[in-house]
Image (cartoon, rainbow, N blue to C red):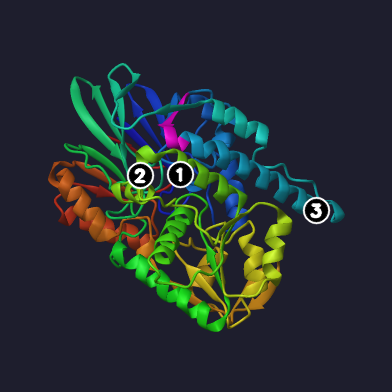
Amino acid sequence: MKLTFHGAAGEVTGSSHIVTINGKNILLDCGLFQGKRKVAFEKNRNFLVDPNQIDVMILSHAHMDHSGNVPTLVKKGFKGKIFCTDATADLCKIMLHDCARIQVHDIEFVNKKRLRQGKNPFEPLYTPEDAERAIQQLVPMPYSKPFKLFDNVEVTFHDAGHILGSAFSEINFRENGAAKKLMFTGDIGRHNIPILKDPVLIKDIDYLITESTYGDRRHPPAEDAKGELGKVVEIICDTKGKLIIPAFSVGRTQYLVYLLNKLFTEGRIQPIPVYVDSPLSSAATQVYSKHRECWDSGAVEFLINGKKPFNFDNMHYTESVEESMALNTMPGPMIIISASGMCEAGRILHHLRNNIDDPKNVVLIVGYMAENTLGRRIAERRREVKIFGEYHPVRAKVEEIAALSAHADEYEMLEYFNGCGASHIEHAFCVHGEKNALEHFSQSLLNAGMKNAHIPTPGQLFEL
């Protein structure tokens, strides 16, 4: 077996790895790189391998840093099947189209400026037509049911507990007469996260490719999230301000809506208006509502008791641009949840521009913010930030709730792998993390009893 690391190697976004077994190339994820725009422009357009050389693809989940560059792969010649879970397929159908629409819109905006400067226009990374071709290659598979990729190669998806449809990939194969097992985590979820089931343990792993996003830190208990969120809501109720929450359309938005619903239902916060201002978030929430087979017992019980997890009296989903713009002139207190999660595009930019300079308001950080993103600069509590090319003073209060993270931390990941039987693992490969997290977590895996732990670099090849 050979492993080649192409994305999220020594960095967080752009997940993409190739497993070669018996001469067949299996691509694990194909995500968008997010960061400095010039670097992202180049990385997302240029693959380290010819897409025509890839035989099949396995997709761990629908987040853009894992799935967002699949249409580019197809555009450049990949014609194979893309295996994923049922819920991931449904989410990708809306997310890839939305991403394509944004690509086209952003390039049109950039090209107007370039043409005025006498420069050649750019092409979008991919178009809605490219996205549709990629969607047609998705092959949905259920959890816990093995399926055959090739002779002597079999895959089983297990619930990863990260977002709806997220999956650990268990790859069982026989090569040169020996039977081995490779596990690819995608992203690892947490125990006791509302809505989703807990991550499923996989035993007898020989080789491991694992995320390391929070491999050097510890989150507060997930149970603390609801109480912490309630405290932040109380702030804007007192100031009559706005709570602006940048949140990923898939996963974090639904988690927040569910917690707010519980807080209102229990009478722990005032019934102030809540707006989810993202058409993609609204569509993703409908997919969440559809796939109840992925819900945990708490969400099911909430539904049985006559409560809809993602809808309540003061809950509003905006669709049109006019509805979104109207929020700017409405008085507080109110809560606005909007995408993108790292504040790099979408309607959240308009809400930040209009509200970040008002001390009555709060900007709430609820997830990981990659380096060189606006979200990271806000989380670092910079005195001013650039939005749409103009600097704005940050006078709003910036709060962060680490307990809302959908990624397992160092201790949660170690607990998971110890449950899997860490000492059985011959080689572990740490990806999807910043330098400190990768270095710390790789040592933690060795301390847990794994025989070898590696931090791959882009393009690095391992023969096992």
Q: Decide: few, some or many residues near mark 2? Use Cα within 10 Å; few <14, some 14-19, many ≥20.
A: some
Q: How far apart are marks 3 and 1 (CA)?
A: 41 Å
Task: Please tell me in which quadrant of the rendered image residue 38 appears.
Answer: bottom right
Q: Is residue 230 above or below residue 187?
A: below
Magenta segment? 81-88
Location of residue 350 in the rendering, given as x and y in whole percent from the top left corner: 67, 65
Was residue 439 drawn as part of the magenta stretch in this picture? no
Question: What count of labels does the image hold?
Answer: 3
Residue 450 shows up from this direction: no
Identify the residue at horizontal 76%, vertical 53% (top origin).
109
Viewer-side residue, 320 vs 359? 320
The answer to whether 328 is drawn above or below residue 124 in the figure is below
Q: Given contact means CB atoms under 8 Å apart, are the residues at marks 1 and 2 in contact?
A: no
| Element type at mark 2 | loop
First of labels 3, 1 by sequence position: 3
Q: Considering the numbered disc 3 on the image, is that residue within a helix, a strand or a loop?
A: helix
Task: Give the answer, above or below, for where 34 lies relative to 127.
Answer: below
Q: Earlier in the sequence, mark 2 or mark 3?
A: 3
**Residue receiving disc 2:** 295
Residue kind at label 3, given as amino acid type: Arg
Q: Do the residues under discs 2 and 3 have CB atoms within 8 angstroms?
A: no
> Which residue appears at 18% of the width and 42% of the height?
425
Q: Which residue occupies the foreground of this view, 38 or 227?
A: 227
The residue that appears at 49% across and 43% down in the rendered structure is: 31
Q: Is residue 296 left or right of residue 346?
A: left
Query: Dot 3 corresponds to which residue?
Result: 114
Judging by the rendered image, the residue that carries numbered circle 1 is 288
Q: In this view, does 206 lie to the left or right of 270?
A: left
Cα–Cα gap, marks 2 and 3: 48 Å
Q: Left or right: where does residue 426 sit relative to residue 321?
A: left
